[in-house]
Image (tube, rainbow, N blue to C red):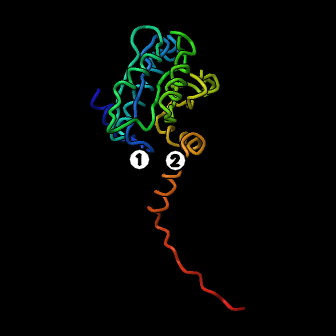
Amino acid sequence: MKNAIDKLADKKKITGFYYDNIGIVIDRSNSMKGNKVESKNTPRAIADFTARVLSKSTKNTVFVETDGETTDLASAFISLLKKENQSKPYQAIFILTDGYENAYDGLTNEVISIYKAESGKDMPIYQISPITSAEMGADVRKLGSGVVTMAINNPVAIQPQIQARLLEIDTKRWLENQVLSISESSVKRINKLKVNA
């Protein structure tokens, strides 16, 4: 079963993904199990599969999971920073969670704000919240102001959502992508003919 899921994740990997080196925090708290009747374990399954797809889409991925039954994303975020390879620094961090942190609510945003202020890095941090129905999309709990929130039920939706926000949150990466797409374009430069009329 795991091999089949791994093969599917490889098939669904995002080609031309924006980042080569990423960190991923996976929420393992009880709230990620979903509704007992409607979607038991579905949010967790979406998060796990999304993490696999992201890993297949990049060159280097570091994973950290939350510990215990509570949602302590702040500690997991700090653990992820400690695991960063300085020769391959993170270009982005993805936090896969429903946003319901309870150790304590708002702590992750405080930690991220301090990290950005003290390190001087303005690396994009994405919150990917698994949704099991269209109605849930509006109810995603945002971790904080320094985090870009995306609601998905399929990893394929990640790239378009990042593209829609990239100019705003990661201008350098957006410009690099534009230059790359132009250089890889099949359009050739031609000289305009001057017509005397």
Tell me the amino acid under the disc marked 1: Thr
**Rendering coords of residue 12 (x, y %):** 39, 40
Q: Is residue 128 visible?
A: no
Circle 1: element type? loop
Would residue 77 be found to the left or right of residue 162 on screen? left
Of badges 2 and 1, the one in the foreground is 2
Would residue 13 be found to the left or right of residue 132 on screen? left
Up the image or down, 18 lies above or below 49; here it is below
Circle 2: element type? helix
Residue that badge 2 annotates: 172
Q: Residue furthest right?
A: 197
Which of 120/74 is in front?
120
In primary-sequence order, the first of circles 2 and 1 is 1
Up the image or down, 91 lies above or below 191; here it is above
Quadrant of the image containing the C terminus: bottom right
Alpha carbons under labels 2 and 1: distance apart: 20 Å
Residue that badge 1 annotates: 15
Q: Say which residue appears at 30% left-offset and 32% top-offset.
A: 4
Tell me the amino acid under the disc marked 2: Lys
Q: Residue 31 carries which label?
A: none
